[in-house]
Amino acid sequence: MTSSSYRPQLSQASAGLTHPVTAIDERGRRETLYIPAERPLTVYVDKRELVTLMTLGAAPEALTLGYLRNQRLVRSLDDIVSVQVDWSVDAVAVVTRGGIQDVEARTAKKVVTTGCGQGSVFGGLMDEVDRIVLPPDARLRQSVVHRIVETVRTQQSVYKQAGSVHGCALFTSDGDLLWFIEDVGRHNAVDAIAGLMWLEGMEGADKVFYTTGRLTSEMVIKGAQMGIPFLLSRSGTTQMGHAVAEQVGMSLLARCSGHHFLLLSGEERLVFEPEWLAALETARTLRTA
C-alpha cells in the first residue's frame, strides 16, 4: 500500500453495534439480551450493484474501501472520488474517476469462502498470490506475541457483551494496538482494517495482524496483500491457509492464548526468548502458590 495524501469524500455512518431483544430463561424469567446488530450493506460502484456485505456497520466506509482493495477491483485510492453510506436503504455508493475496467469479466467468477457470514472472493484473486513478496527481514519477539494476546484479551468488545462476532486487530511489531475492528465475519473485519490502512497510507511490512477466527486461505491471502508478514489467531488454521502461508513466506501463529502458541510457518522470523518465558512462568507459579 503506497502512501498518499489524497482522501476520498467519506460519510461517517457508523451504525449501532448491538440490538436489545427480550429473552426468557429456563425458569421463565424475562431479561433484556443484547445481540449483534447484523445488517446488509449493498455496494454500488458507479451506480452498478456489486455485492451485498453482511456487517455490524462499525466502519462501513473503511469496509467498502478494504473490500475493493483486497478484491483488486480498485488499485489506487486516487481512483475513488467518494464513499457514501446510507443506512436508510442499507447501501453504500462508491464513485470512481474512471470506472472499473472489465468489471463484468473480473467479477463473473466467485469463490464462496469458509468465512463466517459466508464471504466470497472473485476467482482471479488466487492468481495473484505468486506475485506477493513479504519482507524477509521482519522479526517478531516472543514477548510481543504475549503482549498482543493479552491486549486483545482485555479489549472492550461487542463479543464480551453480545457474542457471535469476530474481531481483527492491527499491531506494530512492538505490540502497540493500532485498530481493533469487530464484525459478523472475520473477512469483513480484515477488509475494514485494510481500508483504514489504505486511508492512512500505512505499509504492512512492520505490522502484526491478529484475528479471533480461523486462519483460512482467504485470511492469509488478504493479510499477504496488505504486506503483513505475521498473522496470529486464537483459533486454528486450514490446510489451504497453511499452504498459502508457506507459499508467500508468512509467519503463521495459531492457538494463541496466554504465552502459548503454535508456530506453523515462517520460523525464521520469530525470535524465541527462553529466559523471558522462564521468568514469566516463575512469576505465575509464585502468584498461584
Image: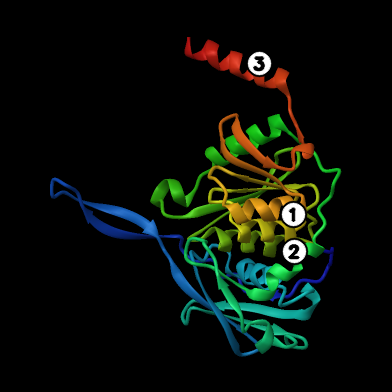
Determine whether 93 is above or below 229 in the image: below
Identify the mark nearer the N-term, 1 or 2: 2
Q: Marks 1 and 2, Cα distance to the nearest angstrom?
A: 8 Å
207 versus 146 height, above or below? below
Check if mark 1's residue and mark 2's residue have beta carbons within 8 Å.
Answer: yes
Q: Residue 255: where, in percent of width, then height?
A: 56, 39
Q: Residue at x 39, y 52 (%)?
A: 162
The residue beneath circle 3 is 279
Q: Amino acid at mark 2?
A: Val
Residue 110: quadrant of the picture: bottom right
Task: From the image, tell me which residue sits under label 2.
Answer: 129
Q: Residues within 10 Å of mark 2 (few under 14, many from 20)?
A: some
3 vs 1, front mark: 1
- The kind of residue tagged 3 is Ala
Residue found 69% across the figure and 70% down from its top: 125
Find out whether the residues at labels 3 and 1 contact each other: C-beta distance under 8 Å: no
Residue under the image location 29 percent in, 60 percent down: 21
Q: Is residue 10 visible?
A: no
C-alpha span from label 3 to label 1 = 35 Å
82 and 254: which one is in front? Answer: 254
Q: Nearer the viewer, residue 78 or 123?
A: 123
Picture coordinates of residue 139 (x, y %)?
A: 80, 39
Give the Cα separation between the discs numbered 3 and 2.
Answer: 41 Å
